[in-house]
Each structure stands twice: as structure tokens, then as C-alpha cells.
Image (tube, grey):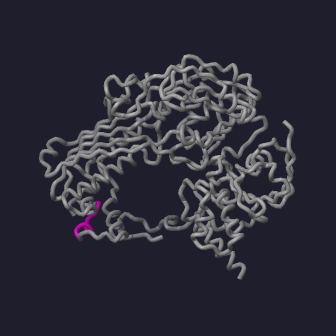
């Protein structure tokens, strides 16, 4: 490993003991010997298996649920519906006051996406649970569904989620998150060129090798131990406490070992219902997504649409940027209102632009609820922004890397969301990238610094 | 349901179990015998996390019925180290940072072991081919390939 000490030499300490030193990973010995304990490596005598009856419709009213045949199936121990869940309507981010509660643990009267959990079946074996789940009869009245964000925002579109009352998340700033900086229209009016482009992405599934799941044991004293592969231990514990109306002191969560997560395991989906099953049966319960469920049911990265309008001068300065971003939350919020909000702060990119206008919408559709995934809220935005940057450079006949040097943010620059830039190292990163990639830029860009404005 | 008796050698030890007809070897190893080193990632033979060695050949334990293993010699990653000394493949995976979440690692090591047992000095292409049935969603393929090549080199140095 090579450390370039010429960058930021005045702030770099040279007495670091760990940086640049190879260290063995503490978890690797367990991995290579097969001793690392993933949640599913625990098994308990008398453990029940939980399988979910899921909605075959994108949007439907539930007229009735008949579990009588399923209850008679050999091996079935317990069947759970909405009425069994103490606090059935929840939303993950209520812990940080991002409401309203808008999602059901088990569907109550309505389903809003294809695959939504309706009835939970607990049985002696996985096979018995699966077979019994197939015998649950749910009578649906299919409703019109909406799958496109812009269609969902039109007047008269089917209402996806009654807890919101409209097909977008209502921020304290209104129907979208807004950033206003300078005078964007004056910026466009004075620009040599204006370029407006639209970018969009599809949902992306994390597809971890280990599927989502948990194993729960009742400890015999009203306490429950939950072995889980959640990436969000305390989020899960606290939300489970709310959903089950059970103090956190009754819940012992064991985890931290995740067989691939990438953000796909930060929702609170399997633990509350599995713990409820253990509570109502007094037996250990295992709820593990099949591969099909992992691909079809678990939250993907949100589909996004990003419309970017930039005003640029012939000398390379971007003078105005207007962005409208749409994040497809699917039927429920989960982490998407936060993702869309992150986008609002992020869309100027690592560039200093004097006039900025940003609106980001978190939109509800009858699609699989989306949630976290590696840099959600900014990753698709970065794709759009950097493609836009290349297009702008081409428009004014400038080298795309030199174009980025001209617009790069530097320490002290005010960002559009009113946070001064600190610790920027974009210029230095690009200088090093220019050398490493053998993409030469003019000497004046190699003399630039993130510290000194105008250098 | 009548149970089926199955007896095989697992990592050098004689092992016997009564299983329901139709039970997979993966389920038998993990939930009956307690060897959880093979992992269940897809239960449909596509991810390779459940790979074990049966009579010298690489097999997917999620698609192998336990009752077909009567009399077989089975190896899993948990039986690879001897007296606490890591197998060269385990050592190489450790030294080259070839693990991330660790879920695919036991299956990868099994696939690599069968390769090196048959082909002690594989080319890079042969390593890639041998690992092609094993998915690493952390996408750490490059260090895994390097680990297998490193283990092969250390084997041939020891033999020399």
C-alpha cells in the first residue's frame, strides 16, 4: 500500500500506528473454519417453522380470510392474522419521529403490494407450514393499482396508502423536500448554455447469499431471545417492542453476524411476527425467507427518476442547477422518506454552484416497498449527476476532468443546504486520479488545492 | 413416517443418523448432526454455499438426499483443519483477505479443495472455472482466486 504524504502534509500526523499496517480481520478465522455462528446455525428442540401467506394482488380489499382448512392440516400449531398483533400498524422511522405509522405487520382489510404478508402459519416442519399456507383462503376484491411515480402524483390516481392520504410523503416543507439557494432562474437567464436531461433507474435487489431471517426462543420467564441477521439491531429491538407492546427488557437480541446485507436487512420484518409466534405457542420459532422471498419480497433499492437542468458558461462554470427527484417508496415508507431527503441535500454534487433549486419527492406506488441499499438516496443521483457533468463538458467542448476541477467544492464554500464545506479533498483526489489513470490535465489544475480559493 | 437409517464417514468419523425419506444432506448435516459449516443460501442448487465433498467429488448438499449417502465419505470445511492447524487453503483465505461476510467461504473452500486435489497447480482460468458455481455477493472474487493460487503455491513448495 502506498501512502501519498504530499497531500495535506501540514495536517497529517506521522505517528499513526495502524494506518498502512496490515491487520488480520478478527472474524476471518471463524469464516475459514466454518465456525462463525450465523443466526440459522442455531437450532432448538421443538422449533416451529413460520411461513407467510402473501397477497397475489398489487392492490386489493380483503373481504374475508378463512383459515379453517389450514388449521386442520397435520403439523399446524398456530395461525396468526392481523388481530393477533398488539400494535399492527407501524413505521420503522417513528423512532426518530418520522411518521405517520403506515404499514401493517399482517394485512388488515387491504393489501397494497403483490407479496404483502397477510397470514402467518406456524407448523412443526417447514413443509407442513408451506402446505398449510396454501390452504388459507383469502377473498380479495381487486382494486386499481398504480406503478408509475408520475402517474401516482396525478389527480385521480388510485390512493395507495390511506395513512398518508395522498401518494407522496408530506414533509414539514410540504409535498417535497426543498433546497433554495441563490436565484436559479436568473442563473439560467445569464448562462451560455442550458441543458435539461432526465435519468431513471429500476429497483435493485441486494440478493445477499444468506436470506433474511431469525430464530426465536422463549426463555421461560416471559423473555425472548432473538437470533437475527438484522443490520439494525436497536432499530429492530425498539420497533419490535412497539409492535408487540412489550418492554425492551423482555427482548434479548443476538446478532451482528450478517451473511451479506448491503442495506437489505435494515427493515423490521421477520422478528416481530416470529417473536409473537414464540410468545403465543411457547416454542422456538424460525422464520427464514426462501430465496424467492428474498428476491421478490425483501425491499429493493428504490426506483428513481431525476430531472436535472443546468446552466453552464463557456469557461466551464456551472451557474445554475435545478433538480427534481422522485423516489419510488412502493406501498410503504420504510426508509424512503429519508432517502429522498438525502437526495435533496446531495444533488448539487461535490460542486459549488451559486444558484440551486431542488425538489425531491417520496412517492407511493403499488410496488414492493423499497428501502436502504448502499448509499440510498444518493447513488442513483450520483449516476445522474456525473453523466450530466460529462454531457455538460461535451456541450462546451471541455475535458470532462478539467470541467470538474473548475466546479469542485473547496473548504469554506457554502453548500446549497447552508452547510459550509469542510475537509473537502475532491481536488486532491482528482489530481491523484489524473496521474493514476494517465488522464493528463493542464498544469493549473494540478496546482489547485481544496484549501485555497482561486489557486 | 418411517425413518431411514443412514451411515457415512464425516470428516473421518463414523456417523449414523435416522432421517425422514426425502431429507437433504444439508438439513441432516446442519440440523441433525450439528455441522453447520455448509450453508443454505438458496436451497435450489444455484449459490454453492452448501458445497461439500462426497467420495472425492464436489456436491451440492441442498440437492443431495441424505439416504443416497449411505457408506459415503463426506468432507466439510469444519473438518479441514487438523489439531488446530489450518489447512493451506484456510491459511491462504485468511492471509489474502478472501473473506468478507463469510457466508460463501466454506463452500468456496470446498470447491477449491476439490480443484487442488485433482489439479495441484491450476492456472488462473482453472481456478475461475472451479469456483464458477459459488456465488460471493460481497463480490470478493479476486482475493478468493488469489487465495486458491496462493494455497496451490504453498502446497507445491511444501512438496518440493
**Is residue A22 depicted above or below A248 in this figure?**
below
Looking at the picture, how far across and down is residue A307, in whole percent?
29, 43
Looking at the picture, how far across and down is residue B6, in whole percent?
85, 49
Q: Is residue A282 visible?
A: yes
**Is residue A171 depicted above or below A315 in this figure?**
above
Q: Let me know if residue B45 is in the magenta part.
A: no
Quarter of the image that includes the C terminus of chain A: bottom left
Instruction: Give the residue displayed 27% in from the left and 59% down from the top.
Output: A404
Q: Is residue B10 left or right of residue A366?
A: right
**Is residue B100 depicted above or below A136 in this figure?**
below
Q: Nearer the viewer, residue A129 or A405?
A: A129
Q: Is residue A183 visible?
A: no
Instruction: Give the residue displayed 40% in from the left and 23% down from the top.
Output: A159
Looking at the picture, how far across and down is residue A382, in whole percent?
35, 50
Instruction: Give the residue displayed 55% in from the left and 28% down from the top.
Output: A55
Query: Which residue range is magenta in the image?
Result: A443-450
Amino acid at each position: 500500500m502506498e501512502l501519498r504524504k504530499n497531500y495535506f502534509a501540514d495536517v497529517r500526523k506521522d505517528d499513526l500506528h495502524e494506518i498502512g499496517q496490515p491487520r488480520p480481520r478478527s472474524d476471518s478465522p471463524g469464516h475459514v473454519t466454518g465456525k462463525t455462528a450465523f443466526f440459522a446455525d442455531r437450532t432448538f428442540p421443538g422449533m416451529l417453522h413460520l411461513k407467510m401467506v402473501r397477497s397475489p394482488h398489487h392492490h386489493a380489499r380483503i373481504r374475508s380470510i378463512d383459515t379453517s382448512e389450514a388449521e386442520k392440516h397435520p403439523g399446524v400449531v398456530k395461525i396468526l392474522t392481523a388481530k393477533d398483533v398488539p400494535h399492527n400498524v407501524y413505521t420503522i422511522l417513528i423512532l426518530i419521529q418520522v411518521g405517520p405509522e403506515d404499514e401493517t405487520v399482517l394485512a388488515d382489510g387491504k393489501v397494497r403490494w403483490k407479496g404483502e404478508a397477510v397470514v402467518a402459519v406456524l407448523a412443526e416442519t417447514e413443509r407442513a407450514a408451506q402446505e398449510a399456507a396454501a390452504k388459507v383462503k383469502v377473498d380479495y376484491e381487486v382494486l386499481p393499482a398504480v406503478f408509475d411515480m408520475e402517474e401516482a402524483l396525478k389527480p385521480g390516481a388510485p390512493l395507495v396508502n390511506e395513512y398518508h392520504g395522498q401518494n407522496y410523503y408530506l414533509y414539514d416543507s410540504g409535498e417535497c423536500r426543498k433546497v433554495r439557494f441563490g436565484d436559479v432562474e436568473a442563473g439560467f437567464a445569464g448562462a451560455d448554455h442550458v441543458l435539461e436531461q432526465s435519468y431513471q433507474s429500476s429497483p435493485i435487489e441486494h440478493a445477499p447469499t444468506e436470506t433474511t431471517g431469525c430464530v426465536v426462543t422463549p426463555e421461560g420467564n416471559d423473555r425472548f431471545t432473538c437470533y437475527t441477521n438484522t443490520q439494525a439491531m436497536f432499530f429492530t429491538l425498539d420497533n419490535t417492542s412497539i409492535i408487540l407492546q412489550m418492554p425492551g427488557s423482555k427482548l434479548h437480541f443476538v446478532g451482528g453476524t450478517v451473511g451479506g446485507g448491503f442495506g437489505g436487512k435494515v427493515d423490521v420484518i421477520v422478528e416481530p411476527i416470529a417473536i409473537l409466534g414464540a410468545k403465543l405457542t411457547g416454542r422456538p420459532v424460525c422464520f427464514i425467507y426462501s430465496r424467492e422471498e428474498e428476491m421478490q419480497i425483501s425491499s429493493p433499492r428504490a426506483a428513481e427518476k431525476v430531472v436535472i437542468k443546468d446552466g453552464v458558461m463557456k469557461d466551464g462554470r456551472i451557474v445554475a442547477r435545478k433538480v427534481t427527484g422522485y423516489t419510488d417508496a412502493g406501498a410503504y415508507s420504510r426508509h424512503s422518506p429519508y432517502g429522498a431527503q438525502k437526495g435533496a441535500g446531495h444533488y448539487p454534487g461535490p460542486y459549488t454552484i451559486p444558484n440551486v433549486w431542488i425538489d425531491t419527492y417520496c412517492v407511493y406506488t403499488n410496488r414492493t416497498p423499497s428501502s436502504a441499499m448502499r448509499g440510498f438516496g444518493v447513488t442513483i443521483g450520483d449516476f445522474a449527476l456525473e453523466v450530466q457533468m460529462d454531457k455538460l463538458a461535451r456541450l462546451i467542448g471541455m475535458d470532462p476532468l478539467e470541467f470538474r476541477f473548475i466546479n469542485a467544492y473547496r473548504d469554506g464554500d457554502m453548500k446549497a443546504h447552508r452547510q459550509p464545506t469542510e475537509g473537502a479533498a475532491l481536488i486532491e483526489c482528482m489530481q491523484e486520479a489524473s496521474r493514476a489513470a494517465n488522464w493528463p490535465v493542464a498544469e493549473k489544475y494540478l496546482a489547485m488545492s481544496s484549501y485555497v480559493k482561486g489557486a | 413416517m418411517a425413518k431411514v437409517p443412514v451411515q457415512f464417514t464425516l470428516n473421518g468419523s463414523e456417523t449414523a443418523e435416522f432421517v425422514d425419506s426425502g431429507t437433504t444432506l444439508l438439513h441432516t448435516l446442519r440440523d441433525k448432526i450439528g455441522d453447520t459449516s455448509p450453508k443454505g443460501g438458496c436451497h435450489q442448487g444455484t449459490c454453492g454455499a452448501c458445497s461439500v465433498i462426497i467420495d472425492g467429488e464436489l456436491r451440492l448438499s441442498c440437492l443431495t438426499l441424505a439416504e443416497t449417502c449411505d457408506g459415503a465419505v463426506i468432507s466439510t470445511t469444519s473438518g479441514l483443519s487438523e489439531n488446530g492447524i489450518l489447512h493451506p487453503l484456510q491459511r491462504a483465505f485468511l492471509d489474502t483477505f478472501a473473506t468478507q461476510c463469510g457466508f460463501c467461504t466454506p463452500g468456496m473452500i470446498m470447491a477449491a479443495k476439490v480443484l487442488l486435489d485433482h489439479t495441484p497447480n491450476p492456472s488462473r482460468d482453472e481456478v475461475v472455472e472451479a469456483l464458477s458455481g459459488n456465488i460471493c455477493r460481497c463480490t470478493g472474487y479476486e482475493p478468493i482466486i488469489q487465495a486458491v493460487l496462493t494455497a496451490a503455491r504453498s502446497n507445491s513448495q511444501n512438496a518440493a
